[in-house]
Amino acid sequence: MFAQRALDPVKCASVVTQLQALLAAADAQAVQVWDDNAVWLRQALPEHFRQIEQAIGQFEFDQALTLMTAALVPAVAQSL
């Protein structure tokens, strides 16, 4: 088993922002961005990862965006 790497907050913010924009635009490129970053997204969003992944895989981008936003609110609150 591989050790988890520490999350890079700058990269996380950049990819999450990009992914949110793609999801909001219903851009299929969101699938590729999700897949390219799935390893650390699983670490960053452990409780919501599977639901978001399923929504993106089914091209339910509005639902994926809603789930992602809900997942990020507690994470942002914890960092304050």
Image (tube, helix red, strand yellow):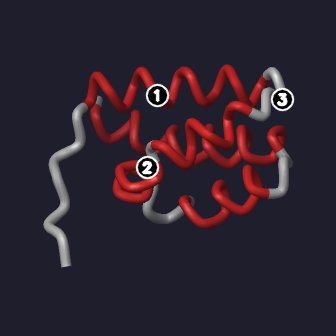
The image quadrant of residue 10 is top left
For residue 36, above or below residue 79: below
Q: Quadrant of the C terminus?
A: top left
For residue 13, above or below residue 57: above
Secondary structure at numbered mark 2: helix
C-alpha separation, residue under disc 2 versus residue under disc 1: 9 Å
Q: Report the residue marked by disc 1.
A: 15
* Residue drawn at x 57%, y 44% as measured from the top left: 34
Measured from the top left, where is residue 47 in percent x and y?
49, 65
Q: Residues within 10 Å of mark 2 (few under 14, many from 20)?
A: some
Measured from the top left, where is residue 69 in percent x and y?
62, 38
C-alpha separation, residue under disc 3 versus residue under disc 2: 20 Å
* Residue drawn at x 67%, y 20% as measured from the top left: 21
Q: Tag on residue 26? A: 3
Q: Is residue 36 left or right of residue 25?
A: left
Q: Report the residue marked by disc 2.
A: 41
